[in-house]
Image (spheres, grey):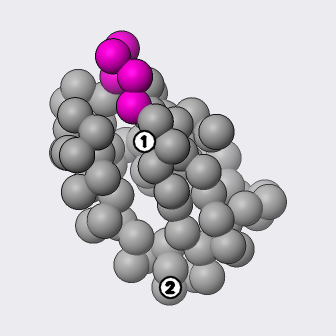
Amino acid sequence: MKEKVEQALAKIRPGLRADGGDVELIDVDAEGVVKVKLLGACHGCPMAAMTLKNGIERYLKKEVPEVKEVIPA
């Protein structure tokens, strides 16, 4: 599943990078919880929580149905 998650993140990275940010995959556990680290302009941004839940998590759940939740590392 980790490889599927990494492939899905690669598809959304250009959008994050366009705003000066990025995302790094830290871990994927057996229960489908994905840990990511927001980088660049995303790190510390007031909208980071919204980006994480409404953007990254929503997209990963769509692309990789085994994903149950995305949390910050």
| Magenta-tinted stretch | 28-32
What type is the residue that disc 1 sits on?
Glu
Given residues 48 and 39, the one toward you in this image is 39
Which corner quadrant of the image does residue 41 belong to? bottom right
Residue 1 in picture, x, y percent from top left: 22, 34
Label 2 secondary element: helix
Q: Which residue is under mark 2?
A: 18
In the image, residue 30 sits, relative to residue 9, either above or below, namely: above
Residue beneath the point at 54% across and 69% down: 22
Q: Going from the N terminus, do you reach mark 2 or mark 1 first? A: 2
Q: Main secondary structure of the magenta part?
A: loop
Given residues 62 and 4, the one toward you in this image is 4
What type is the residue that disc 2 sits on?
Ala
Label 1 secondary element: helix
Residue beneath the point at 28% across and 39% down: 2
Q: Which residue is under mark 1?
A: 57
Residue 54 seen from this side: no
